[in-house]
Amino acid sequence: MRNVAILLFDDAEVLDFAGPFEVFSVASQVHDHKLFNVFTIAKSKQSIRAVNGLKVVPDHNIKNHPTIDILIISGGQGTTPLLEEKEVLDWVKTIHANTEITMSICSGSRVLGVLGLLDNKEYSTHHLVYEDKQKIVPSGSAQKHKRYVNDGKIHTTGGISAGIDASFDIVEKLHGKKVAEETAKFMEYTIVKNKN
């Protein structure tokens, strides 16, 4: 079983974290709860206020949590002030060093960019963030035509709903197409693959 941690913060985009949470949780649910243990994490255990006011209480804080195999960084308006949170950035860099997969959703790619993790790499992000990303990581290669980019250990996605499709892509790579399809069927969701 892999531990999947989803990083939350104020003004995180709801579907950025709720979409992947649902995919990994349901994949495990429909397979005897053996595939993934999914939890949320934030700087503290105080509730965060996501975009449009949804309040969420994180399961863990960055100082006390289980080991993390897959780290998911939400996007949203809150990613801009998050870039000033040195403690959180240092935590992401430390955790990333030991993850199997680190994935940013939407503008969460800003975090990976400022940490130098997208230097000379292909990436995707929300369509309104590409101009900002060129300043953050000028050596990166923006893949504006792709819903998500798998660069080995690092995965990045386009805006909001693209995180769901990238999550299915990871489920398929780790557990096979049948598991991904069974999960999508339970969710009544049609997976959108990247266009070549």
Image (tube, grey):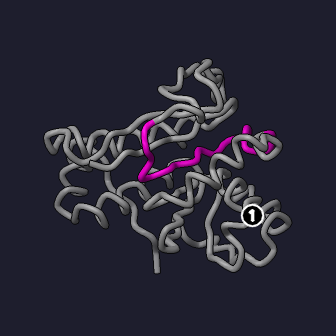
Was residue 78 drawn as part of the magenta stretch in this picture?
yes
58, above or below 132, in the image: above
Q: Write down the residue under mark 1.
A: 130
For the point 47% across and 26% down, the residue is 59
For the point 47% across and 42% down, the residue is 5
- Name the outermost residue toward the left: 32
Magenta extent: 66-81
Residue 152 rendering spot, x and y as whole percentages: 48, 73
For the point 66% across and 66% down, the residue is 117
Horizontally, residue 65 falls left or right of residue 122, namely left
| Of residues 96 and 126, the one drawn nearer to the viewer in this rendering | 96
Was residue 14 drawn as part of the magenta stretch in this picture?
no
- Name the outermost residue toward the right: 135
6, above or below 102, in the image: above
Residue 137 rendering spot, x and y as whole percentages: 78, 69
Three-letter amino acid code at the position of disc 1? Tyr
In the picture, residue 179 is in which quadrant? Answer: bottom left
| Of residues 177 and 174, the one drawn nearer to the viewer in this rendering | 174
Horizontally, residue 22 falls left or right of residue 134, namely left
- Helix, strand, or loop for circle 1? helix
Q: Residues within 10 Å of mark 1 (few under 14, many from 20)?
A: many
Total number of numbered discs in the rendering: 1
For the point 21% across and 42% down, the residue is 186
Horizontally, residue 194 falls left or right of residue 108, namely left
Residue 163 rendering spot, x and y as whole percentages: 49, 52
